Image: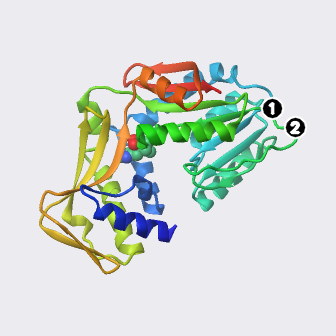
Amino acid sequence: VKDGFLKDVLEGLSGSPKSLPSKYFYDAEGSRLFEAITALPEYYPTRTETALLQRIAPELSAHIPDGATLVEFGSGASVKTRLVLDAAPQIARYVPIDISRTALAEAAEALRRDYPALTIQPLVGDFTQALQLPRSPGEGPRIGFFPGSTLGNFGPRQSERLLTDARALLGDGSRFFVGIDLVKDEATLVAAYDDAAGVTAAFNRNVLVRVRRELAAEVDPDAFDHRAVWNAAERRIEMHLAARIDLVIHVEGRRFEMKAGETIHTENSRKFDLDDFAAEAGAGGWRVETAWREADPAYALVLLAA
Ligand code: AVJ
């Protein structure tokens, strides 16, 4: 991971405009800050999705066959998973996929305690890479679970690739249950990514804290302002770190100069229209079986069928 991180940082800072991949937000401190974000009054996606999931879980359960395997992409602490498992006791097996071995181990242990009849088979890995999931004898159909609108971090082409890979991993007769944040008024969107308490700003700067610590780089995270902007043409919230002054970043003997006001683009969070999402899913080999929609703030849980 370290080598990949260095390579990605050098590549991102060499680019114009400069950028860093958003997946590097999530070290221990970044994950803690993201958890804090989900509790902010401005950050509606998590609580909206959780409430919607709670409400529709019994209906969802009717679409899940007996003996199914639930495969979660980026499972973290498996909090939303419990809502699905509680409503669908016919699920026989749970395969949480996450890059954090420790998060996986902790979540699996807690779930084993609370769901003794469930077979839990954690898979350490990056779900954006083509993963293998060998079929166990007698295994039922697979249901993919990808909540949190994490799909929004991927551009249209990457997202199509992810949906295609998920289709291959989950196999024939599978379904894919995906949470997506929907387009809404700009003020609501921007506030969700630029909260009054400054937690999202700290989350954004944390990627530079990581660069400094893990790559022994010379960079002052506090010399950057947090920016969240709505890009209407691309239908995405962009997060940037804007240099407050002319400055220099040193990484592994390389120097990267920045002018005051120049930014490092750190994240895209796409917001969807249901029709656009259906088209993207279609290109990945899926059709919409059912879509459940929350009106305000707009959010959707979509069940795709292979
Ligand atoms: C975890 C990717 C869904 O894009 O809303 C939260 C990450 N970034 N605040 C999102 C995030 C800034 C979040 N996702």
The answer to whether marks 2 and 1 mark residues whose Cβ atoms lie closer than 8 Å is yes
- The foreground one among 127 and 207 is 127
Which residue corresponds to the image point at 21% horizontal and 61% vertical from the top-left?
224
Q: Position of residue 167 (x, y in %)?
A: 63, 36
Disc 2 to disc 1, how far (Cα)?
9 Å
Residue 144 located left or right of residue 7 = right
| Whole-percent x, y for residue 43 in the image | 36, 38
Secondary structure, mark 2, is loop
**Regarding ligand 1, which quadrant of the image does it lie in?**
top left
* Quadrant housing residue 263: bottom left
Position in image of residue 226 (x %, y %) = 24, 53
Picture residue at 70% right of the left edge, 50% below the top: 132
Evaluate whether residue 148 shows in this view: no
What residue does disc 2 label? 138
The C terminus, quarter of image: top right
Q: Which x, y percent locates residue 140?
A: 80, 33
Q: Is residue 130 above or below residue 222?
A: above
Residue on which the image places disc 1:
67
- The front one of 44 and 16 is 16
The type of colouring in the image is rainbow
Whichever of callouts 2 and 1 sits on the residue coming sooner in the sequence is 1
Looking at this rendering, what residue extends furthest in the bottom direction?
Answer: 253
Question: Does the Cβ of the disc 1 residue fall within 8 Å of ligand 1?
Answer: no
Q: Amino acid at mark 1?
A: Gly
Q: Is residue 128 visible?
A: yes
Residue at 42% x, 43% y is 153
Residue 301 in the figure: left or right of residue 256: right
